[in-house]
Image (cartoon, grey):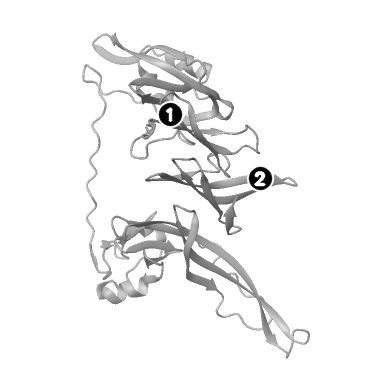
Amino acid sequence: MVDDAGDKRLWVLSKQEESRQVSVGGSNRSSGRWRTDTYFHFSIKAFDPLTAQPAWTQRLVTLGDAKARGTTPSRVIGSDVEAQMLGQDGELVWLLIGNAPYAVSAHDGHVVGDAVAIEKNNPALVGLLPVESKYFGFDGGLVLMTADARQMVIRGADLKASDYVARAIVAPEPEREANGRERIVPMRPPIGEVPARTATLGGQWLGLYTEREAADALHDEFGTRFRYPYTVLDEGAQARRTFHRGTVVQAQRFDERFPRLGKLEPIAGAPVYLKGRFFKDPSKIDTALTMTAPDGLMVWHSTRIDQAGRLALTRLDAELKPVWEARLPLSETGTINPVSTWLLPGRLVVMGDEESVKDGVTSRVPHLVSVDLGTGEWKGWDLVGEKKLP
């Protein structure tokens, strides 16, 4: 998400292949000869997050074979080149296309600076810019390691470089037992989503669990599952979860006092959600976001267990009654299909793929969706077909 003088814009950096038929002789198509040239275009498309509609498009770079001659097809140059956004520095956004850095305008995406401009504004760096993308980074500006192993940073619209001093990272104090010994922290799942299945609403502790998951959460002699909710059994894509109300008690083992669940009971009449998990507060780790006006929570869930299933989001009030449900044109999040979200005042922007299978071939089409958090109504855009959804 890019800030354009206070206006938010979601940028999508894309790569598009084009084949052109080029005439190399003859007065007309029937008598002439033709050559196929291949090009790769890198562009930015900026979206209004409120409407999920394009605001503008800016082409940045086109890669192709400038030496193509005769009827021999051009060399395919750029097929293995990737692009990535690094970060925003005021009115500039830094990105890499292949091994080359570019500074573009946050307002309309036009190229403000490149390697040539960097060397022009920093004569001491002429011939010393790295030629591999791994030597570039971002920390409030473009960070780079020169060919002679100096770390520099370029900040500001004048593209001036200065010595880079990495920000000090203060390691958190390790958790400790009552006797002072360092606590052994269970390892988080190495891949995939860590679902948020616990929340506090109106002073009540809530769990979103299957029957087996709830039993595992309650089987917690030393408080490990309560302290580290990700250690509770996860039944995965077929988990039918409902709300449980928990009673938290203080337990003791030797000199160690710790909280754990003393009771965990399903809430009568509460809805059941397939692969249900709370929408997380983006400013915290594994913590459910508490909604206001009205008070409540949001739950991600699946519409079906099979390939036809789609990702849904339901907002619930303080009584755990649905306020609205939005069924999105997106497949469930996963390792292959990660779903990205951006939380804005009154809206949620979601990007992910819609997966389908036709004639045994699986296709994934990226979509952008903007959800009104007051009503659940959404607007979407097909990033491949370049059209509105639905």
Residue 197, how many percent across, how many down? 44, 26
Q: Is 362 placed above or below 12 here?
A: above
- In the rendered view, does 388 fall on the left or right side of 178? right
Residue 175, how many percent across, how many down? 26, 26
- The label on residue 329 is none
* Crowdedness near tag 2: few (<14), some (14–19) or many (≥20) residues, C-alpha within 10 Å: some
Q: Amino acid at mark 1?
A: Asp
Q: Amino acid at mark 2?
A: Ser
Q: Secondary structure at mark 2?
A: strand
Mark 1–mark 2 Cα distance, whole angstroms, equals: 34 Å
Q: Residue furthest right?
A: 30
The residue positioned 37% from the left and 35% from the top of the image is 293
Residue named by callout 1: 317
The residue positioned 69% from the left and 45% from the top of the image is 357
Looking at the image, which is closer to me, 379 or 312?
Answer: 379
Q: Is 353 placed above or below 321 here?
A: below
Q: Is 27 placed above or below 275 here?
A: below
Q: Is 165 placed above or below 126 here?
A: above
* Crowdedness near tag 1: few (<14), some (14–19) or many (≥20) residues, C-alpha within 10 Å: some
The residue positioned 26% from the left and 13% from the top of the image is 257
Residue 98, how many percent across, how many down? 46, 63
**One can see residue 114 in this view:** no
- The label on residue 356 is 2
Q: Secondary structure at mark 1?
A: strand
- In the rendered view, does 2 fall on the left or right side of 52? left
Which of the two marks, 1 or 2, is nearer to us in this view?
1
Residue 341, how many percent across, how many down? 44, 45
